């Protein structure tokens, strides 16, 4: 007699194969690239991934070392659970809890500094080694106008400058933490709440501001010769009646997020994945997806996120590569039986973390590591063993880079 587990696994594999067949037309669909209509190739040969199961956690970010941060939920009793911030160092088999109390880890830089919140207070953690036996906790400063505990650090750069929000009079306000102070980021004239989501190594900050009805993607930059910051709206005029949201920024100033469609029906108010660069907005996969959100970007301007083809579906992880939108599920071994639902972040070595259905049907976090020569070993392993060359030392094999 066939076991229930075997039946579930067989159904899961069949669903994955049918899903890939149905989604393959995405890569044959016409795309809009900077206002010009171009035909996309079926599949790029430059990307291929090995999927590692990270277990039951919600990933938030990955650094260039391959360390993943996020949180998992612990049940306290039948009715209550708490979220606890965790880090999964690259190569580790177990995730490390940052605290034993309520917390979330939102970002991690290349030096192992983690930004997040502990008991609703903005906090940094310093991961001094991958064993996790010496994690230093540093609560970020707060102004007397804000209640202690009403703040959260959402992003940080490699100088350990953090950004996020604090709550004053019941409203979230965007804030920058730069030793030794927290600095309020300016609003637009018609907005009164918001948050800062990410900061690059140049100090440029992205996030959103709101008038209480619409979210508006914004960019904060330090004024030349001054400590003050200026704010710029990334939204088009017609976005003011919809929503736009800036999630991440890389070091060349490309911003990734979501925006309201420029055409078509607005009755459902579904956003599309967008990028902004030098006052130019680009919609990713316009006319292809029902809705999409860009969540992460690396310094190669590869972008990851989640897209939907059907209203209120579970979603599909996507990667934007070489000016094309692809379903991430096309780039791993179909026999792995993973269904990748959302890609949360990507690093400069093209590692991707996100959430999907594992082979047994459990909703788990994953780490996708590149295997561009498809030999079953990660590119980093091939580089370390001398099997592949990496003359420019960027953790991407030279033979796998597109000139």
Image (cartoon, rainbow, N blue to C red):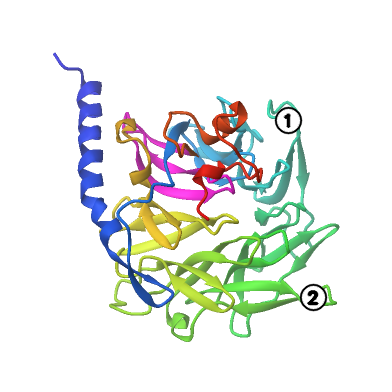
State which region is magenta.
Answer: 338-367
Percent x, y of residue 67: 61, 38
Percent x, y of residue 177: 76, 59
Is 256 within the magenta? no
Q: Quadrant of residue 174?
A: bottom right
Percent x, y of residue 203: 73, 64
Judged left or right of residue 8, residue 260 is right
Judge by depth and name the residue closer to the eye, 28 or 96: 28
Judge by depth and name the residue closer to the eye, 377 or 4: 377
Mark 2 vs mark 1: give the one in front: 1
Read off the residue under disc 1.
129
Res. 170 in view: no
Q: Give the quadrant of the N terminus.
A: top left
Q: Reading the chain from its start, which is encountered first: label 2 or label 1?
A: 1
Judge by depth and name the residue closer to the eye, 152 or 288: 288
Which residue shows up at 79% across the image and 75% down it?
228
Secondary element at image label 1:
loop
Secondary element at image label 2:
loop
Q: Quadrant of residue 298?
A: bottom right
Which residue shows up at 71% across the image and 54% down it?
157
Read off the residue under disc 2.
228
- Is most of the magenta stretch helix, strand or loop? strand
Q: Are there few (<14), some (14-19), or many (20+) residues within 10 Å of tag 1?
A: few
Do the CB atoms of the residues marked 2 and 1 lie less than 8 Å apart?
no
Cα–Cα gap, marks 2 and 1: 36 Å
300 lies above or below 243: above
279 lies above or below 91: below
85 lies above or below 121: above
């Amino acid at each position: 007699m066939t076991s229930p587990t075997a039946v579930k696994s067989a159904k899961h594999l069949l669903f994955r194969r049918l899903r890939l067949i149905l989604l393959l037309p995405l890569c044959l669909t016409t795309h809009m690239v900077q206002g010009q209509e171009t035909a996309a190739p079926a599949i790029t040969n430059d990307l291929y991934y090995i999927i590692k199961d990270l277990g039951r956690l919600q990933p938030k970010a990955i650094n260039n070392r391959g360390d993943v941060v996020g949180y998992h939920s612990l049940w306290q009793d039948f009715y209550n659970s708490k979220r606890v911030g965790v880090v999964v160092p690259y190569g580790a088999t177990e995730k490390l809890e940052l605290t034993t109390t309520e917390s979330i880890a939102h970002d991690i830089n290349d030096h192992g500094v983690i930004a997040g919140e502990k008991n609703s207070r903005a906090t940094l953690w310093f991961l001094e080694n991958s064993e996790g036996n010496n994690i230093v906790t540093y609560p970020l400063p707060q102004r007397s106008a804000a209640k202690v505990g009403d703040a959260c650090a959402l992003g940080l750069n490699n100088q350990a400058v953090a950004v996020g929000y604090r709550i004053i009079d019941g409203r979230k306000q965007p804030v920058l933490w730069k030793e030794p102070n927290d600095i309020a980021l300016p609003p637009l004239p018609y907005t009164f709440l918001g948050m800062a989501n990410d900061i690059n190594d140049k100090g440029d900050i992205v996030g959103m501001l709101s008038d209480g009805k619409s979210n508006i993607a914004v960019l904060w930059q330090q004024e030349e010769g001054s400590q003050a910051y200026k704010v710029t709206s990334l939204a088009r005029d017609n976005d003011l009646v919809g929503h736009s949201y800036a999630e991440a920024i890389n070091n060349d100033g490309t911003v990734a997020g979501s925006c309201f469609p420029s055409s078509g029906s607005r009755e459902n108010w579904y956003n599309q994945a967008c990028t902004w660069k030098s006052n130019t907005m680009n919609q990713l996969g316009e006319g292809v997806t029902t809705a999409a959100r860009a969540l992460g970007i690396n310094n190669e301007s590869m972008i990851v996120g989640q897209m939907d083809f059907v209203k209120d579906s579970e979603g599909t992880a996507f990667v934007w590569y070489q000016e094309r939108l692809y379903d991430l599920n096309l780039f791993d071994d179909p026999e792995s039986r993973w269904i990748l639902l959302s890609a949360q972040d990507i690093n400069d070595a093209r590692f991707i973390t996100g959430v999907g259905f594992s082979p047994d049907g459990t909703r788990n976090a994953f780490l996708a590591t590149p295997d561009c020569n498809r030999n079953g070993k990660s590119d980093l392993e091939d580089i370390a063993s001398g099997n592949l060359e990496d003359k420019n030392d960027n953790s991407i094999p030279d033979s796998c880079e597109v000139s």
